[in-house]
């Protein structure tokens, strides 16, 4: 039996399919957001804010943020080592740590100890938080320089051997390490840290902030206004910085799984 040649899809049908999908997506998103807002309102409408924001609230928020940032860093170490190991043919130093990495590790341990011991003291904590941010990005700049040769050598090898699966992994990891998004994240984190430093070292800014907090939460005494704002500011820093980078890590993980699935069934070649 002769094969019937495949016919190209009717452009009008393609257009109708796209229109239907876009309309369905928009309707469902609007309904989902509206229902979400309604459910949220119904759940919190009877909660009095003076029950949530008390003398103990800053202490709880501050401790929670410290726990979150610690365990996020622990999980990040395992993830980063895994993806770097997948991407490169070799790492400089013949499998040994350079002295600089020991210095970075010691700096992080000392700074995190300073964050824990300065808990509750806004001035000392702000200094430690500033050092934490600068050390975080200083170590990142060092790793960019340290890993540059590994990335270049791996790319040359993968291209020569036509290992396109490994080359795709390398490209993803390179964007993760060298991507411009890291600078945007730094600007966001630095902005929050600058506000924290102003609270710690600028008396006028601290008084203005305390007055603003008391306008929103009039039941709070002035002595609790600044700790509440500062603890929420620190929690905001942790959430912004860690969610931002974990979104990228999750994206890489999904792409790696997808790439592995496709590589197991198809021959991957560049376009």
Image (spheres, rainbow, N blue to C red):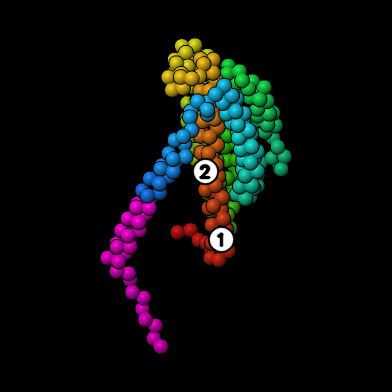
CB atoms of marks 1 and 2 within 8 Å: no
Residue at the spot x=36%, y=75% of the render? 6
Q: Decide whether residue 3 is among the magenta residues.
A: yes
Q: Decide whether residue 104 is among the magenta residues.
A: no
Does residue 159 appear in this view? no
Q: Which residues are magenta?
A: 1-28
Residue 261, labelled with which disc? 1
For mark 2, give the secondary structure.
helix
Residue 66 horizontal/vertical position (percent): 61, 30
Does residue 92 appear in this view? yes
Given residues 88 and 205, the one toward you in this image is 205
**What residue is disc 2 on?**
247
Say if 25 sits above or below 74 in the image. below
Tell me how far mark 1 sits from mark 2, CA to CA: 21 Å
Residue 114 horizontal/vertical position (percent): 66, 23
First in sequence, mark 1 or 2: give its number.
Answer: 2
The N terminus lies in which quarter of the figure?
A: bottom left
Q: Residue 144: name its quadrant.
A: top right
Q: Residue furthest top?
A: 203
- In front: label 1 or label 2: 2
Residue at the spot x=33%, y=74% of the render? 7
For mark 1, give the secondary structure.
helix
> Crowding at label 2, few (<14), some or many (≥20) Cα neighbours within 10 Å?
few
Residue at the spot x=58%, y=34% of the render? 140
Residue at the spot x=41%, y=42% of the render? 37
> Crowding at label 1, few (<14), some or many (≥20) Cα neighbours within 10 Å?
few
Residue 99, labelled with which disc? none
Residue 135 horizontal/vertical position (percent): 60, 28
Q: Residue 141: name its quadrant.
A: top right
Say if 103 sits above or below 122 in the image. below
Number of numbered labels in the structure image: 2
């Amino acid at each position: 039996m002769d094969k019937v040649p495949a016919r190209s899809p009717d452009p009008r049908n393609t257009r109708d399919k796209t229109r239907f999908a876009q309309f369905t997506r928009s309707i469902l998103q609007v309904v989902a957001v509206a229902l979400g807002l309604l459910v949220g309102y119904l759940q919190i409408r009877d909660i009095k804010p003076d029950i949530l924001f008390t003398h103990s609230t800053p202490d709880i928020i501050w401790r929670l943020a410290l726990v979150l940032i610690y365990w996020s860093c622990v999980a990040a170490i395992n993830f980063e080592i895994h993806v770097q190991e997948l991407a490169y043919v070799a790492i400089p130093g013949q499998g040994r740590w350079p002295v600089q990495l020991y210095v970075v590790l010691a700096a992080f341990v000392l700074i995190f100890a300073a964050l824990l011991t300065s808990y509750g003291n806004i001035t000392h904590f702000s200094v430690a938080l500033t050092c934490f941010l600068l050390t975080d990005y200083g170590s990142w700049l060092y790793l960019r320089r340290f890993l540059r040769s590994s990335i270049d050598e791996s790319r040359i090898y993968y291209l020569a051997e036509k290992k396109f699966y490994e080359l795709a992994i390398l490209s993803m990891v390179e964007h993760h390490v060298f991507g411009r998004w890291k600078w945007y994240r730094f600007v966001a984190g630095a902005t929050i840290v600058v506000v924290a430093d102003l609270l710690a070292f600028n008396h006028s800014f601290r008084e203005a902030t305390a007055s603003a907090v008391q306008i929103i939460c009039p039941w709070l005494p002035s002595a609790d206004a600044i700790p509440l704002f500062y603890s929420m500011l620190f929690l905001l820093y942790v959430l912004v910085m860690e969610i931002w980078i974990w979104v990228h890590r999750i994206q890489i993980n999904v792409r790696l799984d997808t790439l592995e699935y496709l590589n197991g069934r198809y021959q991957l070649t560049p376009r």
